[in-house]
Structures are given as structure tokens and as C-alpha cells.
Image: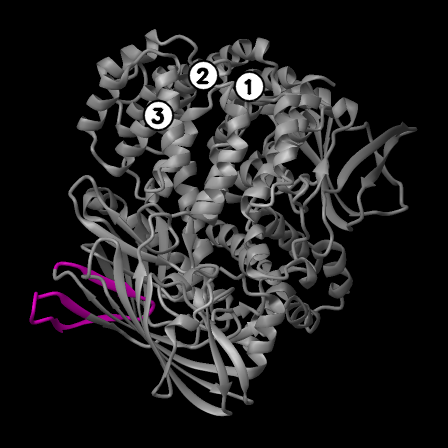
Amino acid sequence: MSALTRNEAQLRARILDVHHYAVTLDLTTGDDTFDSTTVIRFTARTAGDTFLELKPDELRTATLDGHPLDPAALDGNRLPLTGLAEGPHELRVDARMRYSRTGEGLHRFTDPADDETYVYSQMFLDDVQRVFPAFDQPDLKAVFEFAVTAPAHWTVLANGITTRTGDRETDGAGHWTSAPTPVISTYLAAVAAGPWHSITTEHAGIPFGIHCRRSLAPHLDADADELLSLTTACFDHYHATFTEPYPFDSYDQAFVPEFNAGAMENPGLVTFRDEYVFRSAVTDTERQRRAVTIAHEMAHMWFGDLVTLAWFDDIWLNESFAEYMGYQALTEATRFTGTWTDFAVSRKAWGYDADQRPSTHPVAPDPADVPDTTSALLNFDGISYAKGASALRQLVAWIGEKDFLAGINTHFARHKFANASLADFVDSLAAHTDRDVHTWAESWLRTTGTDTLTPRIQESRGGWTLTVDRHGSRPHRITAGTYELAPDGILERGELIDLDVPTDEILSVAGPRPDLLVLNDGDLTYAKVRLDETSLETALRGMRRIPDPLTRAVVWGSLRDMVRDGELAPAAYLATAEAHLPDESDLAIVQGVLAFARTHVADHYTAPADRGDALATLTGIARDLLRRTEDATDPGLRLTAVRTLVDSATQPDTIAAWLADGTVPGGPELDPALRWRILARLAVLGAVDEAAIDEALAADPSATGREGAARCRASLPTPEAKAAAWQSLFHDDTLSNYLFSATAQGFWQPEQADLVRDYVPRYYPDAIALGARRGPAIGEAAGRWAFPVHAADETNLEAGRAALEHPDLIPLLRRKLADHLADLTRTLHIRNP
């Protein structure tokens, strides 16, 4: 299949105006394929040749203005349109298309809980071609209408309001049509069909709906009030913030199975991974993260859907803005007022880590660095999301929120229902501020890497002086917070110092030097910050005494970066967590610190010989947290403690007793998620067998139960279990994307390094062949989940570096391998400084 190049897209955009797609889908033709008939109306501005894209199972017929085209002319995914005359045209294509099992195109899923089947589209980035033919590029917007034939008991959803127009006489199948959309890009067209459980309402004159598969109905019902109130609160907030009204006729949110991303911003029909319909207990931080996703996707209705990037070098105009607005909207309009704390302690690290790997790229890459759709797909990462949102937060701090929002609204007014670039956006901002935003954009959006800000404090007569050393190239507007240790042990906030970095000015401050000075207090910029010697000592001893959770998150982030940069011993980080987490009041900080301590410090940065001590420390922290919650209603903290106890267990007896009893003493009753979590850890420890996993699956025959069972089977410490898991991963091409990921997550375990040692060199050729055979989604999953991350040695590094030169290595997998190898190199440096 040929990737579309930017040059080809620009040429085609000069030739064509695309007006309308009428897409007819018949979903009753079988379990593997569906029928797709499409009529495209477009105009050729000049006579010439072009093409459209299509990935059919069979191209039956194609006609241009009533004249047949040769189906054999289809070359890969391109159907040539030669000798086009200037003027209007109508293209009609009839094809048989293949359902996906990998979350690409039209994904088909049969729910093991009740045998009901669901299909939904994921057209991004260029997967519309798997569903119907298209001039598939973001700047050829058009109106879309769907006509769908589906089983009689199904409901069909689409971008526009859908109506059931009748039943097919032959078999009673239902026929549905959708209202025409405003002009949108091809990758945003969407359809979802199945026997949905739906809850509908109306707000501000617009139909709203939330939908999930029937087996999840009780869980959606339990959260319906929260989901709908969040949705309407965000909707009202955006309407108050943006001068352009919501541009579509309805707002449906469908929670769909086996979804590859968190969500997708299809206009009027946002799709979410249905893990967001919580089957089991979750913490309030996890509810907040779901809320952020809801707010993020709604922001896309303006950032991305109303105004769309012209080419994928400007993906940040979609994702960075939606990320920033999602967090800000929740903070201002809902009960989740601490979202930026979770961003600072967890989400932002995604950006920092990505920005220090070989695959780093600017927030807004040079167009030459995104020459085609394949390269564009690589940039959906922590830089386009977390770093971009951080850059926007710094921009707001620099020019002020009023001018920032005025620039955004000018951008919408100038480019609504059209396409825009970085230059267009900067011009819109420049119309409302005297600041040099063009220079700011060059220094912030066109550069890579993280700056590091380090304070230098010198005591002087009657006071102290502060200078900030910057390692990097960007300007920063920050606040430095000063804190004094009070007699009661609390660190009281003193003067807040506003700083522009870099500056030649040495700031003089009266009074004694502070016990703690925190650069970037409030987390308004994107930079690693260091603590001076006195402040570091204060933080390590008194973290819990810092009054503001966002400040604590910034300091924890500094310690995290110091560990990754080899400046703070992993054991010191664990000791700090042991000293302060049991008294931490902010759940997001507890979860974020424990997650880094478990998945990075204990499993990677700690030498294998010391890993048992690290897990014992985490177990001690979790027990202290659990004791803290015995006399208080704090279910999120209790759940976090129990999860940590399970994940850090080195002996099976205690957690096996919990599984047998169905409850944790002093903790919660075991729901399905905790049961599968315990069973997976017992599998790693060799304390369960296949029969126990089969019994658990019989008790929970759901989709998540199947994934739990796959994870457990792959975790069993026997040669037979590992051989069977490897066969499924790399040689069973029917394995769905979710079952692949679950099996891969179970396969590599630090406790089983000797057992799986021979699989490490096998990984590279098998993963390369798998990616080439099954495509980007499974290739990316093979890189993300199946990589031998625990094999931190030179042998693995050498094998990986050699694999990077393989000619069949697909780009998504290449990036994952390169990043993992960089992380392994970092791990070796931390272990052997």
C-alpha cells in the first residue's frame, strides 16, 4: 500500500474540490466482509490525472460519470482517474470490504458475554480506505451521508443524526440513514452499529447520547449522571469560551470495544475505549482522567473538526490544544479542580521522556520532516500531547489568557470549516498581543529537547541572591516559590518571585534564605527543574509538609528527573516515597509516585539483586496506606494500596488467601479487576495453574475476562506456557489487538528472566515479520507491549541495534524499538553510573 505524500496531497488539492460522499454499507453479508457502495461528487478545477484511495477485499465496479473504470487498474490502494475533464464529476464505486480485528477501518467485535456483535469505524489517519473509497487527505473536506443496512435489532450511529427508514423485506434487516454533515475531513467520518445500550437526553437544543454494548449496561447506567453532567458542563464552558457555536447537529459518545486509542474526535460521534465504562472500582483520579478525555474530545469539535490541519505536520494544532483545553475546562467548570496536579505528576512525564529519546521531534515539525502519512503517524506521542499542552500553558502565562482566547476565536472565525497551519494560528494570536509570538513559536514549537533550570542561591548581608542557570534555548516565564520551615513543621509559603529566564539580572531578596526554593512553582512551563542543595535536603526530609499539592507534584517531578538522569539514587527516591506517601493527601500524587516507583524504579533502574528490597519497600508503603484508611472513608487510597500490595508481592500466600476469601482485610471486596490482578500475580509466582485460570474465566466470561485469562496464561512460569504464548503472539494472525496486548503484557516478567532468556533474540525477527504481515496497529503493539524491557544487557542492545537496520522493519515498530533501546541504555547507566 502506498503512503500519500505531502507533495501528492498538495497537487491533488490544487486540482480537485470534493463536495459530497454518499456511503452505503451493508453489514448483513457475513462475519468477515461487508458491502460498500460510494458515490463521490467532486469538481476538477483543471483537466488532468489524479487518483483516489481504496483498500478493498474485492473491487467489483467503478464508474466515472457513467463510464466504467477497469477494476484491474487498482494499484495497491490507488485507483487512477486519468484524463479528467475540467468541471463536475460523479464517481461510483462498489466493493466488498474486509472487517478489521485490529481496530483499524471497520472493526468487528463479538462480545463473549452474550454473543452480540458490534462494529465501529476508526478512519484515522488513512484508514477510511478500509471502509470506503476517498480522496483521503485532511484538506479535501466534504459533506458525508451514510445509508446503512444492519441486523434488525441493531442501532446505527453516525456523524449526523440517524433515522431508521424501514426494514428490508427479504430478511427484515434494518435500514438507517444519517443526516448530512457540514464539510469535514475524510478521517473524521464515522459510523458505529450494534445492539447498543443507549441513554439519551437533550441539552441546549442538541441531542446528546451515551452508548455501550449491552453487557456493560448496568455499569454505564451507574455512571450516566456523572458522564452526562461532565459532558454538558464542558459543553457550556466551551460555549462561553469560544465565539463559534458548536458546529454539528448532535453529540453522541460511544464506548466501543478493542479501541486502539483513548478516544477519537469524530464530529457528533466521539468513540471511546470502553474500559472507560468501569466494571470494577476505580479511584477518583481515574475518574478525573476519564473526565479529561471527555473534555479533550469535545475540545476537538473546534480544534480539529471545525478548523482542521492542512497537513499532518500540524497535528499539534489538534492534540496540543485539545489536551490543554481539556485540563483547563475541567479545572474551571467541574468538581475536578486539581487536574493540573495529575498532569504535573503523571501526564507531563510522558512528554519529558519522549523528548529525551532518539525519536524526539518538535511540537510543530518542519513540513519536510513529515513527507507522507506513514511518517505522520509516528508523531502521536507525548510531544504532540503533553509537551504541546505544556507549551500552550507557558504561552498563556506569557501573553495572558485574555489575549490567548481572543487569538483562538479569531482563528476559528478566519478558518471555520476549512484548514489552517501553524502560520495561520500565529497570525491570529499576533492580532491580539504586542508580544512577538512569531519568535516565541520558533523557539518553542520548532525545537526539540527539554531545558533544565537550576537555581543558584548565595547568602549576602541582610538577604540572599538568586540566579537561574538555563541549560537549553527557550525563554521561560516562571514563578519561584519560597518556603520557610515553621515551628510546627509545616513549610509555609513565603514570597512568590516572578522570573523571566534567561536574564542577566541577579535577584536580591531581603531576609534569610528560604529552606526550600521551587522553580516553576505552579508548573507553568515545560522544563526540568533542579533543587539547590539546601532545598533538596528539605524536600527529601519534608516533602509532605509542602502545603500545595501542585507544588509537591513539581518537586516529585524534579526527583523523578534526577533519578532518570542519574543524579539521585533509585533507593533514595524509594526512601522519600516511604517517608512521605503514607501522609500524602492528594491521591493523584500517591498514584503517580507509586506508578513510577513500581514500573521504573523497582523493575528497571534497580539492579536485579536489589529488586526484592525495592518491592519490600513498596509493600511497606502500601501497608502504611492501608492502615491509614482503616478508620477513614478513603476508597481510592485503599484501592491504590491494595493494588500495590498485589503487584509487589514476592510470596503468594497472602494474596492467594485474599482471592480465596473474596476480600482484603481492612480493604475492599474483590471485584473482577482485582481478582484478575491477583490471579496474574499468582501466575507470575507460579502459584496457580491453567485449571485455575479456566475456572476464573468461566466465572467471568467477559471480554476483559478473556484478556485477563490471556495475560495470566502468558505469565505462567513454565516452558509450555511461554511457548504457547509466543505462538499466539507471533504466529496466530487471528489474534485481536486487545488479546495480543494482554498476552504480550504477561509474557516478560523480571522474576522469569532465566526462563525467557532464549526468547530475547527471537523477538526481533519475529516482531519485524509480524509488523510487515499484520500492519501498523499490531506492529505498534508488538513494539509497545512485547519488547523484552527487562533484558537490560549489552546482548539485547546489540541485537536491537542490528534489527533497526532490517529492510522490512515498519516505521511504527522502528520507532518503538529505537525508543526502548534508548531506555535500556539509560537503565544500564543508572545501574552502573
Q: Position of residue 180 (x, y in %)?
A: 33, 77
Dot 1: within a 10 Å radius of its alpha carbon, few (fewer than 14), some, or many (20 or more) residues? many
Give me the C-alpha separation between circle 2 and circle 1.
9 Å
Q: Which residues are magenta?
A: 153-175
Apparent side of residue 741 relative to residue 172 in the rendered image (left or right): right
Q: Nearer the viewer, residue 464 or 761?
A: 761
Q: Position of residue 639 (x, y in %)?
A: 37, 25
Tell me the kind of residue under disc 3. Answer: Ala
Residue placed under numbered mark 2 in the picture: 648
Dot 2: within a 10 Å radius of its alpha carbon, few (fewer than 14), some, or many (20 or more) residues? many
Residue placed under numbered mark 3 in the picture: 724
Apparent side of residue 782 relative to residue 20 in the rendered image (left or right): right
Apparent side of residue 579 relative to residue 694 in the rendered image (left or right): right
Of discs 3 and 1, which sits in the foreground?
A: 3
Q: Nearer the viewer, residue 321 or 158?
A: 158
Q: Earlier in the sequence, mark 3 or mark 1?
A: 1
Vertical order, 96 against 609 (above or below): below
**Magenta stretch: residue 459 in it?**
no
